[in-house]
Each structure stands twice: as structure tokens, then as C-alpha cells.
Image: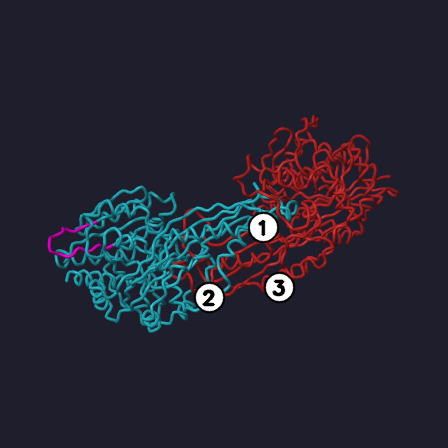
Chain colours: A red, B cyan
Amino acid sequence: MFARQNVPRYNVRMRASHLEDFYSFLRFPSISTDDNYSERVSECAHWLVGKLTGIGLKAELVPTPGHPVVWARNQHRGGRRTVLIYGHYDVQPPDPLELWDSPPFDPVLKDGYVFARGATDNKGQILSHILGIQETIEEDGELPINLHLVIEGEEEIGSANLGKFLIQNRDSLKSDVAVVSDTGMITRGVPTLSYGLRGVTALEIKVTGPKMDLHSGVFGGAVANPITALAQLLGTLHDREGRVAIAGFYDRVKSLEDWEREAWRKLPIDGDREVLKETGAPELFGEAGYNSFERLWGRPTAEINGIGGGYQGKGTKTVIASHAMAKLTFRLVPNQEGDEILKLARAHLRKNLPKGVTLDITDGHSGPWYLTDPHSPGGEAAQRALRKAFNADVALIREGGSIPIVSQFRGILGIETLLMGLALADCRAHSPNENFPLENLEGGIRLNKAVLRELAG
Amino acid sequence: MFARQNVPRYNVRMRASHLEDFYSFLRFPSISTDDNYSERVSECAHWLVGKLTGIGLKAELVPTPGHPVVWARNQHRGGRRTVLIYGHYDVQPPDPLELWDSPPFDPVLKDGYVFARGATDNKGQILSHILGIQETIEEDGELPINLHLVIEGEEEIGSANLGKFLIQNRDSLKSDVAVVSDTGMITRGVPTLSYGLRGVTALEIKVTGPKMDLHSGVFGGAVANPITALAQLLGTLHDREGRVAIAGFYDRVKSLEDWEREAWRKLPIDGDREVLKETGAPELFGEAGYNSFERLWGRPTAEINGIGGGYQGKGTKTVIASHAMAKLTFRLVPNQEGDEILKLARAHLRKNLPKGVTLDITDGHSGPWYLTDPHSPGGEAAQRALRKAFNADVALIREGGSIPIVSQFRGILGIETLLMGLALADCRAHSPNENFPLENLEGGIRLNKAVLRELAG
């Protein structure tokens, strides 16, 4: 998960057609959250169907009320294990555009890294599975397992329609285990099995005062300023030691196990040092009593993802804004429940609303946390495949991000998920200059081939 | 200053050429704060010189490091009083554009009101003086006083270069009194002399955490969120009862006199009711212990005029922003000093900065408060002119806004200023759909003619 190290350049021998596929995939601005890009999202899905059909799978586009699901299968045969590989072809918006060194949808290869929005999250990772399947079919004529490949277009906006897809096709999709590469490697070259994920739930708030922007000289002092009120309100979300101050927020939080705190302390990298290095933050800051890995993987958060109100242009404008808004997300850990956290948050916000303004709250998307046993038979098979693909000891970790679908695989299909991520911390998922090392694309191809063989038993 | 009443429509008999002049003046987007509009500001100044020359004044454009000053004079003669009339031709930015019912620089006449940015602040008001001078010259062949007409292009950005203009031309500009119409009438039809103004001082703050935007799942909880830190910081500026919580902020504040609190209570309108009506705010809110007029005219404020950080677009983006910013202004009353307030504010912000982030503070423009005696000989002449022009009793008030130049007239030229404003509260200065009633343009013309005669003695 963390840090590009100063190790000798990896000697990647990538097949030219694989690189071409990667570039073609990255060129689609498949931004799921922005309606203006709906057609480009759809074009990306069509490209995938073409690619999967081309390597010998039966692939189709399954429409949803939002963006379509790409679903591909090989010829299933009795007596074989069935494996569901999941990924997503949609990406985050590229803003702020001016911080990119090259256009986000015009991939550039530099020092072995490919730079583009979606390079890591998730196009590079899901493509490595596709290319692994391609090579296995080329080498062996067929796959050693029955395959379901499910690639959705709404992961970045909460996978709102994938659950319905799973429910509607529950019988067809019956599988033994799911494989997902949408998480990170603890550091370059260290194969990593993630056995836990944080959940997420979101809301947006709007604080309104006067019916229009006012002259702050003429009216300042006699009416509440919505920006001031919003700041005061948001200032109540945390105490000054980094704890979330919403009543009941920690009530269901399961304490970290001693064995995992111990295991994380023994990982080949130091979390505190890596967080400082990767983020460039002036200092560490988080919930008192926990180190960085524990804060990131085992503790919940309340984050403000965006705020806006009044005049943000050049110079001065002496206004009292009519309204101001903020976007919030909460990261959840076992055994918090998204709906309950939203309820507590809404109650907190209403209770702490300053005088003189009104408050509108809009709930956003949600996804639950995930926790599984890395020592199950599937987990052990994954560890063997990881060791084989990367020729190194496997790190067992949790992750700070959220993959809501993993809980749906458990809830709807009744299967556990093996999270074998290929992202490095400085791959800049969700940030400008997102990138993916070709050595991880190549490693991902080897991993796919190994894990299908290991899971075949 | 307050409120369009439900009175019968005023029957305006406006000369067509006056209306044409008003429209021409309003069509210039003379936005002084935005460098992209520098040429349009200059075009507006050139138009004024042409107009003033056309009515028989000697007019010139005085360059400054910023926008030029328009300076016009009649033929001065010994033994006459000298009057300096001041106004400004620059305007506020029109944002948010989408809230305008008609384009801000394409004036529209509707029910006797002209809608355009600058209609009230200050083009309509200064033009009424120009047209009054024009009519007096047309009727009498000359003015009864020696005139200096000074119209600057930087009032909305703090009049940074007008002081130097006054200093450099101190001898030439020697006058007995200044006349300014850049304030308000207490209500429609009630002539108003403003004997006090609040000052203003500004600063901008930027809170920075990580060196780039981060994935709030991957990194959330281990580094400080700059938006959260900014909200917490801004939340310390006030207590929950509306008092500014900066140490020392009120130390130099002069208490309101009993006589003015009494006079304001007897005004023909109720401040609390008018503030609610004009702003549409859900309730009154301000410093405990004061009514709305007292809060607006006699008490200082700390206002956040703008805030921004992170993702403000449609949908959700799970980021921790690298930085967040806010724009602040403080309204000042006697005997606060802008530099001292900035110093106290900077100290407060640095002292209350949450952990894990850094703070940059940039000082903005400043202007002092003003207080004069409405019963001086000049003040009495102004009251007579106001009574004559509007045929009604004169209201004596203070104002919440700031006209920094008024203190410069006193400090540099040694003269007092008569503030005889023509703005109504719902003229929406600084807001979308700014407008000016033609009856006030006409009243302003009568007022100019009357006040020059009264001041001539």
C-alpha cells in the first residue's frame, strides 16, 4: 500500500498489445458521477465487451437504471470451482485539472509508470486480470475454473445498481469465492492480502440565511452569516484531539484485536513515517491513542470533502452569502451501521445548528465495512498465489478505503472475497497524476494465472 | 435606507437624454477588482470625461498605479465657497450571475426602477449630481460655488490610490466641504443625512495540510483535514450570542450615545422589522443587547465573505483537500483602528489554529470609520437642501457600510463630508438585480441644485 522505494528499476517485458489495451481502456473519460459523461461511460463498457469477446469469453452488457454492468463468462463445466472476479470501469472526476502534469485521459508512460485517471483505480488492476485470463486461455486452451467476470460502472458513486444485478442473477452467478483487486500493496514488491475494509456513508448539508447575497456593510451584524454558521456547525464534528464528537458515534465500534495491532507493528514499513512521506502533511494528526495504521484501517472518521459559499474569486467582495454548503463522508468500521451513523450525524447537526439560519441535509451513498478471515481455505489459496506471483512473504492487512460491493457478495451471493490489491500509495488514486506501475500490471497478470490455478484446487 | 413601500407610483418626468446618459454609464462593466476588466474600467472613465466636458466643465483623467481618477472643475472665482463632490464609477463583480433576472450590464427599466450592476452603487447617485450641475449651468449660466468633482475608479477595492491623488493635489483641491451620495435613505421619500459610517478591514486565510488532494478512505484519520481545521478555526471567531470572540476586539469601541439610540428608535421605520423584510433571513441574529439599527450602525462585526475547499461539484468525491481558504472582513466603529484589529485577528487565528495544518494570512484593504456633527453649519445647510429637494423631514442616522475616502477628506484636505445618500435598502447594492428608482435620480438632481445653492450661503 505504501511508497515507491528506491530500488533498481524493474525490467518489465510487457507485450505491446497489452500496453495498447491499457491505453485504450484509459482513454475513456468514464466519470460515473457526472451526467455529462454518460455516453463516454457507455463507450468504455462497449470497449470492454469487445475485448472480452476477443479473448474467447461470452460477454454481455447488462443495462441498469444507471451505467451498465459488463458480465463475461467462459464455458462452465460441472465439477469445477466457480470464481467471480470483480472490478469497475468507472473513474473519479479528474479535478483539479490544473494540477495534472499531463491530460488525465491521455495516458503517458514515464519511468515505468503509466499516468492517467483510473490507471490504478481500477482500470490497471482489472485489466491485469483480463490479460491473465487471456494468457491462460492462449497457453492452456481454457481456464481451470468456471469464471464470472463482473465489471461495473458505478463503483465511484456507490454501486447503487449492482446489488439489483446480483439479486436478479443470483442463481446464474452462484460462485465459490470472489476475487477483487481494488486495494493496495503495503509497499512495492510485497504481496498483500487485505482482510478488512472500512465502510462509508455520505451526506451533504446546506445552511441558508438571507434570501439573497447581502452587502456585508449594510446588513452585517443584524443577520446570521451562513458561512459563519456552517463553520461553527462543522467545528462541532470533532474534538481538538481528533475524535469524532457525534454522540453515539463510537458506541458500536469493535476494538482492534491484540494480534492485529501486533501484526501491523511488524509490517516491513512504518505507518507513521509512510503517511508523513506520502501525504506531505506537516505532521501526523488523528485519534489519540492509535498509530497511523490503526487510525487508517481500524478506526472510523468524519471527513469534510468539500465546502463552498460566498465569493471565492480574486480580490474582495463584501457580501454575506445567502447560503453555504459542505459535503461530508464518514468511514465506518465493524460494527458501525451506515444508516445509524447518518441518523446520529443528522441529529448532531440539527442540535448544534447555530441561530439565525436553516439547515438542509441530503443523504448520499453508503457502503458497509468488511471483515473476513485470512486463514480460510480461500484465504490460504490467495496467500499461496500471492507468494508465487511476487516471490515474497505476504502481508496481511486491512484497508482504509471502502468497496461496498464486497459486503453484497457476502450478503447476496453468500461468498467471501479475496482482496489482492495492486495499488501503491503513491499511485495517487482519486488525486491528480494518478499512475500505475507496469511491473504491477505484469505482476497482476501472473497473480491472476496463479490464483485461478490455486483456487481450482 | 430601508424598504420600498406600497405607495402610489411616482410620476417621474425624466428628460430622455438623462436616461440615455444613465444607460450609457451603466453599460460599462467597470469591475475594479478583476484585472480582466481593466480596459472596460478605463473606457468608463473616458466616457465620464466626455460627459463632463460636454456640460461645460474642465475635465481630465488623472492616472494612478491602478484605475484613473476623473477630476472636473468649473471656472473658480474668488469669494465663493468651494465644494468637492465625490463619487465612484467602479462597481462590484456581478456574481452570482445566474441570480440576475436580466444581464447586469444591460440596463432594464421596470416599474420605474433601472436594473443593472452599479445602478445604485454608485453610478445612479453620482450621475444625479452631474445632471444637477448640468441643469444649473443650463438655467443660470454658471454654478453658485467653485466645484471640484472627483470620481474615482477604485472605491470597491479600497480606494488605494485616491489618498495619493488628494495629497499630490492638496492645494488645488482646497475646499470648504465635501458632498457624497453613496449612502442610503432611511426609507423611500425620507431625506436622510448620515453622520457616521463603519470602517472596514480585510484579510484572507489559507489553511494547508497534505501536499495534494488525498483519497479520504486511504488516508482519512491519519492526517488533519484542512477544511475541518478551517471550520474549527472560523468557528472560534464568534461566541454563540453573536459577539466577536477575538481578544481585545471591543476594547476601543465607543458606546452609543443615549441621544442617538433614542433618535434611532423614533425613526419612521422599525429596524428589526425592516431587516427581516429586506433580507428574508429566518430570524434576526446579532450581538446581544442591541437592536438592529444599533447593530448595523454602531457595533463592529467579523464577517466571512467567502469560503472554499475540496470538491464543490455535483455528486460525491471522497477527497481530503490539500487546502481550504476563507475571505474575512471586519466592520469597524469609533474608536477601533484597522491595523490593530488586523493584528488582534492574526494573533487570534494563529493561537486557535488546530493541529496538523499550516496557516497563511494575507491582509486586504482597509478603511477607517467616520463620525461627524450633523448640526455643524454645513450639516444644517445639507438638512435644508434635503428638506427642500424631498419636501419632508430629514432623518439623522449612521450607516453600516464604509466609505474610507471620507476619512481621507478629513485627514488630508481638512474638510468634513456631508453624506446625503439616495440608495434604498432594496436597491440591492452588491447583490444580484441591483436597481435604482428613477424618482431618486430625479430627486438627486433637485438635491444637487439645492445643496449647491445652500452651501453658497
- Which numbered mark, 2 or 1, is in the foreground of this view? 2
Circles 3 and 1 on the same subunit: yes
Residue B15 point in image, percent of width and height: 23, 60
Q: Residues within 10 Å of mark 3 (few under 14, many from 20)?
A: some
Seen as rendered, the residue at the extreme left is: B78
Q: Is residue A85 visible?
A: no
What is the number of callouts on the image?
3
Q: Quadrant of residue B212?
A: top right
Residue on which disc 3 sits = A347
Relative horizontal placement of residue A95, taking residue B391 as reference (left or right): right
User: Is residue B80 in the magenta section?
Assistant: yes
Rounded to the nearest whole Å, what is the CA distance between mark 3 and mark 1?
Answer: 20 Å
Which secondary structure, mark 1?
A: strand
Which secondary structure, mark 3?
A: helix
Residue B167 point in image, percent of width and height: 25, 46
**Which residues are drawn in magenta?**
B72-85
Residue in the foreground of this view, choosing between A89 and A360: A360
Q: Tell me the chain of label 3.
A: A
Relative horizontal placement of residue A387, taking residue B293 as reference (left or right): right
Residue on which disc 1 sits = A305
Q: Please tell me which of labels 3 and 1 falls first in the chain.
A: 1
Residue B198 point in image, percent of width and height: 35, 59
User: Is residue A331 in the magenta section?
Assistant: no
Residue kind at label 2, given as amino acid type: Phe
Residue on which disc 2 sits = B285
Circles 2 and 1 on the same subunit: no
Residue kind at label 3, given as amino acid type: Ala
Vertical order, B93 against A277 (above or below):
below
Vertical order, A65 against B10 (above or below):
above
